[in-house]
Amino acid sequence: MNRIVALILAGGVGSRMNLSIPKQFVVVDGLTVLQHTMLAFQCHQLVSAIYVVASPQWTETVRQQAKDASIGKFATCLNAGENSFQSAKNGIMALQKEEEENTVVLIHDAVRPLVSQDIISRNIAVCLSRGNAITTLPSQESYMVINSGTGNNNKEITSSEYILREKLLRAQTPHTFLLRELVTMMKEAEEKGLTYSQSIFTLANELGHVPLHTAEGEMMNFKLTLPSDFTIFQAILHETRG
């Protein structure tokens, strides 16, 4: 059977939070966000190893936090890049030296700590049966398309088009692929001079590595982006733990 590993992207700086430390290292209910996320993969019986991509100055912190939270599946910390795409690329290319090419890799945001065992299981099953898996949710809203040339201030933005919610899916993480395909995509991106993409699934589209197959996500698997998200996260933890 294919070996299954998690690649957790923890290289972000969390600039929108106005914090003195990256948001993945903020303590919530006794554990850092990263520890909560690592524990989700630690608990899954099919996941064999956990790799964390982090900035070099946080490497020792990550290792200590893995030890403190008894993350026995923690393998090593890999160096992040200057943005999320470069961090993913660094992690993928480093995995090439650690894992077999048919290894299933679940690439996950460190700041999505409520990823469930079911989401992980669905990603693994879909990837093994169809070749890849992108965690998604149906959109609950229709979307307005911003007219080109309008500003970032809501008072200046105009729209003349819309997209029906029935045509949209909301992408979450994990994004799950075989390691060999991830390595191929990164090499193709380098050959084509692509130095940035919003995510692995957008890169796959840009390079023509389609179709992409969906694995059902969950509302609770949200990304901690704003201060209010931390309040919601803590409330959920208190509710679920009694």
Image (cartoon, rainbow, N blue to C red):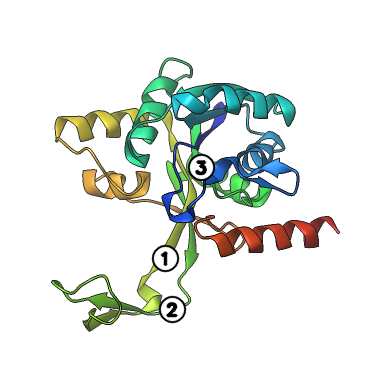
- State how far apart marks 2 and 3 are (Cα): 31 Å
Q: Is residue 150 above or below residue 40?
A: below
Kindly identify the amino acid type of the residue bearing the numbered disc 2: Glu
Q: Residue at x 52, y 30 (%)?
A: 52
Q: Which mark is residue 22?
A: 3
Q: Nearer the viewer, residue 67 or 4?
A: 67
Q: Residue at x 48, y 59 (%)?
A: 136
Q: Is residue 212 above or below residue 188?
A: below
Q: Which residue is mark 2?
A: 141
- State how far apart marks 1 and 2 are (Cα): 10 Å
Check disc 1 and report its element: helix, strand or loop: strand
Q: Pointer 1: residues within 10 angstroms few (<14), some, or many (20+)?
A: some
Q: Is residue 144 above or below residue 234?
A: below
Q: Which residue is mark 1?
A: 169
The quadrant holding residue 62 is top right
Check disc 2 and report its element: helix, strand or loop: loop
Q: Nearer the viewer, residue 43 or 125?
A: 43
Quadrant of the drawing holding the C terminus? bottom right
Relative image position of residue 153 (x, y in whole percent): 28, 74
Q: Pointer 2: residues within 10 angstroms few (<14), some, or many (20+)?
A: few
Q: Earlier in the sequence, mark 1 or mark 2?
A: 2
Check disc 3 and report its element: helix, strand or loop: loop
Q: Residue at x 61, y 58 (%)?
A: 230
Relative image position of residue 20 (x, y in whole percent): 52, 44
- State how far apart marks 1 and 3 are (Cα): 29 Å
Relative image position of residue 112 (x, y in whole percent): 56, 50
For the view shown, which residue lies furthest in the right direction?
242
